[in-house]
Image (tube, rainbow, N blue to C red):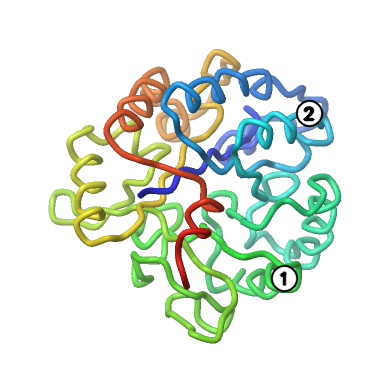
Amino acid sequence: MNLLGIDFEEWYHPELIQKYIDRDNNKPKVIHGIEKIIDLLRLKDTKATFFVVGELLEFKPEILDIILENGHEIGFHTMYHTKLDDTGYDKRFEDEIKKFNILTNKRSKGFRAPTFSLNKKSAGIIDILERNNYLYDSSVVPANSGMYGIPNAPQNPYKISSKDITKHDPNAKIIEFPLLVTEFLGKKIPAGGGFFLRTLPMRVIKKALRDYEERNIPASFYIHSWELTPEYMPDITLPFKENFITFHNIGKAYKKMSELLDEFRFTSFEDYIKTREF
Protein backbone atom coordinates (compact mmCIF):
# COMPACT_ATOMS: atom_id res chain seq x y z
CA MET A 1 0.00 0.00 0.00
CA ASN A 2 1.26 3.47 -0.94
CA LEU A 3 0.53 6.89 0.54
CA LEU A 4 -1.05 9.82 -1.29
CA GLY A 5 -0.79 13.42 -0.17
CA ILE A 6 -2.64 16.25 -1.91
CA ASP A 7 -0.72 19.44 -1.19
CA PHE A 8 -3.74 21.74 -1.19
CA GLU A 9 -2.43 25.16 -2.14
CA GLU A 10 -3.45 28.24 -4.07
CA TRP A 11 -2.02 29.52 -7.34
CA TYR A 12 0.06 32.11 -5.46
CA HIS A 13 1.63 29.68 -2.97
CA PRO A 14 4.39 27.92 -4.98
CA GLU A 15 7.79 29.27 -4.01
CA LEU A 16 8.88 30.01 -7.57
CA ILE A 17 5.74 32.07 -8.15
CA GLN A 18 5.87 33.98 -4.87
CA LYS A 19 9.06 35.74 -5.96
CA TYR A 20 7.32 37.39 -8.91
CA ILE A 21 3.89 38.42 -7.63
CA ASP A 22 2.46 40.80 -5.10
CA ARG A 23 0.89 38.64 -2.41
CA ASP A 24 -1.55 41.37 -1.38
CA ASN A 25 -5.14 41.07 -2.58
CA ASN A 26 -4.68 37.79 -4.45
CA LYS A 27 -7.97 35.92 -4.50
CA PRO A 28 -8.07 32.12 -4.14
CA LYS A 29 -9.16 30.25 -7.27
CA VAL A 30 -7.79 26.73 -6.96
CA ILE A 31 -10.03 26.00 -3.97
CA HIS A 32 -12.97 25.93 -6.37
CA GLY A 33 -11.47 22.79 -7.91
CA ILE A 34 -11.73 20.69 -4.75
CA GLU A 35 -14.78 18.80 -5.98
CA LYS A 36 -12.90 17.79 -9.13
CA ILE A 37 -10.14 16.31 -6.95
CA ILE A 38 -12.65 14.59 -4.66
CA ASP A 39 -14.44 13.14 -7.69
CA LEU A 40 -11.17 11.71 -9.05
CA LEU A 41 -10.42 10.01 -5.73
CA ARG A 42 -13.97 8.68 -5.50
CA LEU A 43 -13.78 7.30 -9.04
CA LYS A 44 -10.51 5.51 -8.20
CA ASP A 45 -11.76 4.33 -4.78
CA THR A 46 -8.75 6.04 -3.17
CA LYS A 47 -8.34 7.82 0.15
CA ALA A 48 -5.80 10.63 0.49
CA THR A 49 -4.38 13.10 2.97
CA PHE A 50 -4.99 16.75 2.10
CA PHE A 51 -2.09 18.82 3.43
CA VAL A 52 -3.89 22.15 3.48
CA VAL A 53 -2.46 25.67 3.69
CA GLY A 54 -4.35 27.03 6.69
CA GLU A 55 -5.36 30.40 5.30
CA LEU A 56 -7.57 28.58 2.78
CA LEU A 57 -9.67 27.19 5.63
CA GLU A 58 -10.13 30.75 6.84
CA PHE A 59 -11.32 31.79 3.39
CA LYS A 60 -13.53 28.74 2.82
CA PRO A 61 -14.13 26.77 6.06
CA GLU A 62 -16.30 24.17 4.29
CA ILE A 63 -13.13 22.72 2.74
CA LEU A 64 -12.64 20.82 6.01
CA ASP A 65 -16.08 19.22 5.84
CA ILE A 66 -15.68 18.31 2.17
CA ILE A 67 -12.41 16.52 2.91
CA LEU A 68 -13.56 14.69 6.04
CA GLU A 69 -17.06 13.78 4.85
CA ASN A 70 -15.54 12.02 1.85
CA GLY A 71 -13.33 9.85 4.05
CA HIS A 72 -10.06 11.71 3.53
CA GLU A 73 -7.62 13.13 6.08
CA ILE A 74 -6.69 16.73 6.86
CA GLY A 75 -3.01 17.60 7.37
CA PHE A 76 -1.07 20.79 8.09
CA HIS A 77 0.93 22.61 5.39
CA THR A 78 1.63 25.81 7.41
CA MET A 79 -0.78 28.72 7.47
CA TYR A 80 0.69 30.70 4.55
CA HIS A 81 2.95 28.21 2.72
CA THR A 82 6.08 29.52 4.40
CA LYS A 83 9.37 27.65 4.08
CA LEU A 84 10.46 26.30 7.46
CA ASP A 85 14.00 27.60 7.06
CA ASP A 86 12.93 31.20 6.45
CA THR A 87 14.64 33.43 9.01
CA GLY A 88 12.61 33.68 12.20
CA TYR A 89 9.83 31.37 11.07
CA ASP A 90 10.57 28.78 13.75
CA LYS A 91 9.29 31.30 16.32
CA ARG A 92 5.97 31.66 14.47
CA PHE A 93 5.45 28.00 13.63
CA GLU A 94 3.96 26.99 16.97
CA ASP A 95 1.44 29.84 16.84
CA GLU A 96 0.43 28.71 13.37
CA ILE A 97 0.01 25.07 14.31
CA LYS A 98 -2.18 26.05 17.26
CA LYS A 99 -4.29 28.22 14.95
CA PHE A 100 -4.63 25.35 12.50
CA ASN A 101 -5.66 23.04 15.34
CA ILE A 102 -8.50 25.43 16.15
CA LEU A 103 -9.57 25.64 12.50
CA THR A 104 -9.63 21.83 12.21
CA ASN A 105 -10.89 21.00 15.71
CA LYS A 106 -7.55 19.19 16.29
CA ARG A 107 -8.25 16.70 13.48
CA SER A 108 -4.80 17.18 11.96
CA LYS A 109 -2.10 14.74 13.06
CA GLY A 110 0.26 15.02 10.08
CA PHE A 111 2.48 17.72 8.60
CA ARG A 112 4.26 18.45 5.34
CA ALA A 113 6.74 21.30 4.95
CA PRO A 114 6.28 23.66 2.00
CA THR A 115 8.97 23.04 -0.62
CA PHE A 116 10.13 20.11 1.53
CA SER A 117 12.05 22.64 3.62
CA LEU A 118 12.65 20.41 6.64
CA ASN A 119 16.43 20.37 7.03
CA LYS A 120 19.12 20.69 9.67
CA LYS A 121 18.37 24.40 10.11
CA SER A 122 14.64 23.85 10.62
CA ALA A 123 14.79 20.54 12.52
CA GLY A 124 13.39 22.14 15.67
CA ILE A 125 9.87 21.98 14.24
CA ILE A 126 9.92 18.25 15.02
CA ASP A 127 9.82 19.14 18.72
CA ILE A 128 6.91 21.51 18.08
CA LEU A 129 4.99 18.79 16.25
CA GLU A 130 5.52 16.49 19.24
CA ARG A 131 4.30 19.12 21.71
CA ASN A 132 1.13 19.52 19.67
CA ASN A 133 0.37 15.78 19.60
CA TYR A 134 1.19 15.23 15.94
CA LEU A 135 1.92 11.67 14.89
CA TYR A 136 3.86 11.98 11.66
CA ASP A 137 5.66 14.13 9.15
CA SER A 138 6.24 13.68 5.41
CA SER A 139 8.75 16.35 4.47
CA VAL A 140 11.98 14.44 3.81
CA VAL A 141 13.09 13.76 0.25
CA PRO A 142 16.05 11.35 0.43
CA ALA A 143 17.65 12.71 -2.76
CA ASN A 144 18.99 16.04 -3.97
CA SER A 145 16.59 17.92 -6.23
CA GLY A 146 18.58 21.13 -6.46
CA MET A 147 15.94 23.01 -4.45
CA TYR A 148 15.67 20.60 -1.50
CA GLY A 149 16.54 17.12 -0.37
CA ILE A 150 18.38 15.11 2.30
CA PRO A 151 20.25 12.47 0.26
CA ASN A 152 21.49 10.49 3.28
CA ALA A 153 18.07 10.09 4.90
CA PRO A 154 16.38 6.64 4.97
CA GLN A 155 13.92 5.72 2.23
CA ASN A 156 11.68 3.69 4.53
CA PRO A 157 9.53 5.18 7.32
CA TYR A 158 11.49 5.93 10.52
CA LYS A 159 11.18 7.69 13.86
CA ILE A 160 12.58 11.18 13.41
CA SER A 161 13.98 13.56 16.04
CA SER A 162 15.39 17.06 15.97
CA LYS A 163 18.77 15.72 17.10
CA ASP A 164 19.44 14.15 13.71
CA ILE A 165 16.71 14.10 11.07
CA THR A 166 18.69 11.65 8.93
CA LYS A 167 18.63 8.72 11.37
CA HIS A 168 16.07 6.51 13.06
CA ASP A 169 15.62 7.36 16.73
CA PRO A 170 13.74 4.58 18.57
CA ASN A 171 12.84 7.01 21.34
CA ALA A 172 11.31 9.60 19.01
CA LYS A 173 7.54 10.09 18.73
CA ILE A 174 7.17 11.44 15.19
CA ILE A 175 7.06 8.98 12.29
CA GLU A 176 8.75 10.26 9.14
CA PHE A 177 7.39 9.09 5.78
CA PRO A 178 10.05 10.02 3.19
CA LEU A 179 9.01 10.77 -0.38
CA LEU A 180 9.54 8.26 -3.17
CA VAL A 181 12.96 8.31 -4.89
CA THR A 182 14.51 6.24 -7.67
CA GLU A 183 17.63 5.71 -9.75
CA PHE A 184 17.60 7.43 -13.14
CA LEU A 185 20.55 7.63 -15.50
CA GLY A 186 22.81 6.48 -12.68
CA LYS A 187 21.66 9.15 -10.22
CA LYS A 188 19.27 9.04 -7.25
CA ILE A 189 16.45 11.48 -7.88
CA PRO A 190 13.02 12.33 -6.44
CA ALA A 191 10.14 10.46 -8.10
CA GLY A 192 7.32 11.10 -5.64
CA GLY A 193 5.16 13.53 -7.59
CA GLY A 194 4.92 17.19 -8.51
CA PHE A 195 7.44 18.35 -11.11
CA PHE A 196 8.88 14.84 -11.30
CA LEU A 197 5.47 13.31 -12.07
CA ARG A 198 5.03 15.86 -14.84
CA THR A 199 8.54 15.44 -16.25
CA LEU A 200 9.76 11.87 -15.79
CA PRO A 201 8.59 9.12 -18.16
CA MET A 202 5.76 7.11 -16.63
CA ARG A 203 7.78 3.91 -16.94
CA VAL A 204 10.37 5.40 -14.54
CA ILE A 205 7.77 6.36 -11.93
CA LYS A 206 5.98 3.01 -12.20
CA LYS A 207 9.27 1.14 -11.84
CA ALA A 208 10.05 3.18 -8.71
CA LEU A 209 6.66 2.26 -7.23
CA ARG A 210 7.16 -1.41 -8.05
CA ASP A 211 10.66 -1.36 -6.53
CA TYR A 212 9.21 -0.02 -3.28
CA GLU A 213 6.47 -2.64 -3.33
CA GLU A 214 9.06 -5.40 -3.74
CA ARG A 215 10.97 -4.02 -0.74
CA ASN A 216 7.73 -3.65 1.25
CA ILE A 217 8.24 0.12 1.61
CA PRO A 218 5.18 2.40 1.39
CA ALA A 219 5.86 4.93 -1.36
CA SER A 220 4.88 8.45 -0.30
CA PHE A 221 3.53 10.28 -3.33
CA TYR A 222 2.21 13.82 -3.69
CA ILE A 223 0.52 16.11 -6.14
CA HIS A 224 -0.46 19.76 -5.84
CA SER A 225 -4.09 20.79 -6.06
CA TRP A 226 -3.17 23.30 -8.79
CA GLU A 227 -1.59 20.52 -10.87
CA LEU A 228 -4.89 18.63 -10.83
CA THR A 229 -6.88 21.78 -11.63
CA PRO A 230 -4.70 23.80 -14.04
CA GLU A 231 -7.80 25.54 -15.35
CA TYR A 232 -7.72 27.68 -12.21
CA MET A 233 -4.08 28.72 -12.63
CA PRO A 234 -3.70 32.26 -14.02
CA ASP A 235 -1.22 33.02 -16.78
CA ILE A 236 1.82 34.26 -14.86
CA THR A 237 4.95 35.60 -16.53
CA LEU A 238 8.02 33.92 -15.04
CA PRO A 239 11.67 33.55 -16.08
CA PHE A 240 12.35 30.44 -18.16
CA LYS A 241 13.66 28.20 -15.37
CA GLU A 242 10.92 29.09 -12.89
CA ASN A 243 8.26 28.76 -15.60
CA PHE A 244 9.57 25.34 -16.64
CA ILE A 245 9.65 23.93 -13.10
CA THR A 246 6.21 25.29 -12.24
CA PHE A 247 4.24 24.73 -15.43
CA HIS A 248 5.99 22.09 -17.55
CA ASN A 249 3.44 19.45 -18.62
CA ILE A 250 0.91 20.77 -16.12
CA GLY A 251 -1.86 19.80 -18.52
CA LYS A 252 -0.78 16.15 -18.29
CA ALA A 253 -0.65 15.88 -14.48
CA TYR A 254 -4.29 14.86 -14.00
CA LYS A 255 -4.09 12.10 -16.60
CA LYS A 256 -0.80 10.79 -15.21
CA MET A 257 -2.12 10.73 -11.65
CA SER A 258 -5.29 9.01 -12.82
CA GLU A 259 -3.20 6.34 -14.55
CA LEU A 260 -1.18 5.69 -11.39
CA LEU A 261 -4.35 5.39 -9.31
CA ASP A 262 -5.59 2.74 -11.74
CA GLU A 263 -2.42 0.67 -11.46
CA PHE A 264 -1.30 1.13 -7.83
CA ARG A 265 -3.06 1.23 -4.47
CA PHE A 266 -2.86 4.41 -2.39
CA THR A 267 -4.38 5.48 0.90
CA SER A 268 -4.18 8.28 3.45
CA PHE A 269 -1.39 8.43 6.01
CA GLU A 270 -3.98 8.16 8.78
CA ASP A 271 -5.46 4.93 7.46
CA TYR A 272 -2.03 3.44 6.80
CA ILE A 273 -0.83 4.15 10.36
CA LYS A 274 -3.92 2.42 11.79
CA THR A 275 -2.83 -0.84 10.16
CA ARG A 276 0.84 -0.77 11.24
CA GLU A 277 2.97 -0.76 14.35
CA PHE A 278 5.89 1.67 14.58
Mark 2, residue position:
62
What residue lies at 56% left-to-right and 15% top-to-bottom?
235
Q: Quadrant of residue 90?
A: bottom right
Circle 2 packing at 10 Å, graded few (<14), some (14-19), many (20+), is few
- Mark-to-mark CA distance, 1 and 2: 27 Å
Query: Which percent across, then down, holds residue 226?
Result: 55, 27
Which marked residue is nearer to the observer: mark 1 or mark 2? 2
Q: On the rendered structure, is 148 left or right of 152?
A: right
Relative to 239, say whether 204 is above or below. below
Q: Amino acid at mark 1?
A: Ile
Q: Which mark is residue 128?
A: 1
What residue lies at 68% left-to-right and 37% top-to-bottom?
68
Q: Amino acid at mark 2?
A: Glu
Marked residue nearer the N-terminal end (1 or 2):
2
Q: Nearer the viewer, residue 101 or 70?
A: 70
Q: Nearer the viewer, residue 135 or 200?
A: 135
Q: Nearer the viewer, residue 155 or 143?
A: 155
Give the structural element (helix, strand or loop) at label 1: helix
**Are the residues at dot 1 and dot 2 in contact (C-beta closer than 8 Å)?**
no
Give the structural element (helix, strand or loop) at label 2: helix
Query: Which percent across, then down, holds residue 187?
Result: 20, 56
